[in-house]
Image: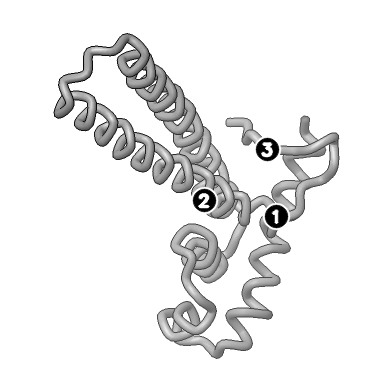
Amino acid sequence: MRYELVEKRGEQLKAKEYLNKIRSMEAGINADIEEIESLTTLATKVTSVISDDRVQSTGDQQKIATYSAKIADLKSKTARELVELLDYKKSAKKIIRESCSTDCVTLLHKRYFQYKKWEEIAVEMNYSYQWVSDGLHKKGLSQVQKALDDIEEGS
């Protein structure tokens, strides 16, 4: 299976940037979800006010329809982004599993997929903070970078 890499203008993608993109993609999706919730609340309030006042204005109905269309568009966009995120995570996990030693797989998963702090990871893996945050992390990133380089050369 060929891995899909996100590259800008042919620049080589570095391992840390590649893995940090997961958090960035999730942040964008979470922002969209919050906006959907906000717009839905606002649309519900507008609908409620219109219904309570028994206003039968065409303009008000068009505003509600406009809100509904914007919410539907944002939901559709968010669903597409979620699919992209899931595909990206699947590719990243596969690269990590196939290119890294067991300890590096564990560390990279905890750091880039579970967003754990170095202190937590060190305790869970029973290693020193220094080894986890510096030595093992660099080793894992180096292994991922080699795999990314190999993929790039093969394309």
Q: Quadrant of residue 146?
A: bottom right
Q: Residue at horizontal 54%, vertical 60%?
A: 112
Q: Earlier in the sequence, mark 3 or mark 2?
A: 3
Q: CA distance from mark 3 to mark 2?
A: 19 Å
Q: Position of residue 36 (x, y in %)?
A: 38, 37
Instruction: Check disc 2 and report its element: helix, strand or loop.
Output: helix
The residue type indicated by label 3 comes to: Leu
Instruction: Indicate which disc residue 17 carries.
Output: 1
Count the marks: how many?
A: 3
Q: Which residue is mark 3?
A: 5
Q: Earlier in the sequence, mark 2 or mark 1?
A: 1
Q: Residue at horizontal 70%, vertical 49%?
A: 147
The residue type indicated by label 1 comes to: Glu
Q: Position of residue 73 (x, y in %)?
A: 45, 22
The vertical placement of 132 against 35, above or below, is below
Contact between marks 2 and 1 (CB within 8 A): the answer is no
Instruction: Check disc 3 and report its element: helix, strand or loop.
Output: loop
Q: Is residue 149 left or right of residue 96?
A: right
- Foreground of the two, 72 or 134: 72
Q: Nearer the viewer, mark 3 or mark 1?
A: 1
The residue type indicated by label 2 comes to: Ala
Q: CA distance from mark 3 to mark 1?
A: 11 Å
Q: Local crowd at mark 2 within 10 Å, few (<14), some, or many (≥20)?
A: few
Instruction: Indicate which disc residue 27 carries.
Output: 2
Instruction: Check disc 1 and report its element: helix, strand or loop.
Output: helix
Instruction: Indicate which disc residue 35 carries.
Output: none
